[in-house]
């Protein structure tokens, strides 16, 4: 089984339980759409986070999981009545578990125009190696 198949998303539309405590301060959450690509050296994670600024984004990498929280803020202009909005103010929450094959020390993230690109290098132990026959 390859590394990509070990990632399991945590679907969450309500406050979630994470490591024994409730994330009630997040309020209602929505899972963003994302895509995972795998190479021999790394995993590439692309997450769509429309309306999220760098200051409102929190990425936490632990030994066996990646957690992305994006808090949306929208200040309604004065004297403006909202008739309809296609998006809500829900916080984005994405939690992905992995089998400890990611080198979190060398992870790299970039946010541009509402798209987060995260590079997660694999640990040396799980990279494929060619073995020469003597």
Image (tube, rainbow, N blue to C red):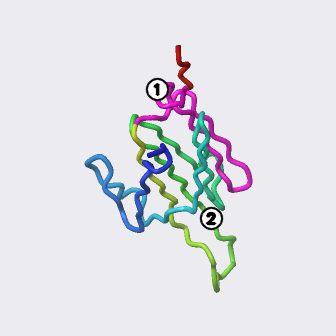
Query: Residue placed farthest to the bottom in the image?
Result: 83
Crowding at label 2, few (<14), some or many (≥20) Cα neighbours within 10 Å? Answer: few
User: Dot 1, how many residues are within 10 Å of its Cα: few (below 14), some (14-19), or many (20+)?
Assistant: few
Residue at x 50%, y 52% (from the top left corner):
69
Q: Is residue 38 magenta?
A: no
Q: Which mark is residue 74?
A: 2
Q: Is disc 1 placed on a helix, strand or loop?
A: helix
Q: Position of residue 128 (x, y in %)?
A: 54, 31
Tell whether 116 sits left or right of 94. Answer: right
- Closer to the camera, 82 or 100? 100
The residue at 53%/13% (across/down) is 134
Front-lying residue, 47 or 38: 38
Left or right of 16 on screen, residue 32 = right
Q: Where does residue 54 sit, x and y in percent of width and height?
A: 64, 46
> Which residue occupies the extreme left position in the image?
20
* Residue 101 in the image: above or below residue 26: above
What x and y, as percent, mark residue 31?
A: 50, 63
- Residue range in magenta is 100-129
Query: Quick one: 43 or 79, which is closer to the camera?
Result: 43
The part of the image, by quadrant, that contains residue 35 is: bottom right
Instruction: Calculate the distance from the C-alpha at mark 2 to the C-alpha at mark 1.
Output: 45 Å
Q: Is residue 120 magenta?
A: yes
* Position of residue 20 measured from the top left corner of the image (x, y, whole percent): 25, 48
Precedes in sequence: disc 2 or disc 1: 2
To which residue does mark 1 refer?
Answer: 125
Residue at 55%, 62% (x, y): give it: 32
Query: Toward the viewer: 13 or 63?
Result: 63
Name the quadrant containing residue 106. top right
- Judged left or right of residue 90, residue 110 is right
Task: Name the residue: 63% across, 52% down.
Answer: 46
Q: Residue furthest right?
A: 113
Residue at far front of view:
134
């Amino acid at each position: 089984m390859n590394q990509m198949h070990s990632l399991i998303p945590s679907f969450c539309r309500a406050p979630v339980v994470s490591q024994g405590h409730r994330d009630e301060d997040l309020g209602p959450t929505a899972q963003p759409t994302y895509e995972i690509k795998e190479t021999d050296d790394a995993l590439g994670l692309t997450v769509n986070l429309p309306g999220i600024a760098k200051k409102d984004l929190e990425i936490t990498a632990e030994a066996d999981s990646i957690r992305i929280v994006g808090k949306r803020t929208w200040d309604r202009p004065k004297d403006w009545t909202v008739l309809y909005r296609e998006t809500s103010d829900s916080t984005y929450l994405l939690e992905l578990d992995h089998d400890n094959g990611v080198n979190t020390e060398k992870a790299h993230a970039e946010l541009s125009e509402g798209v987060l690109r995260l590079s997660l290098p694999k640990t040396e132990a799980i990279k494929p190696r060619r073995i020469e026959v003597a």
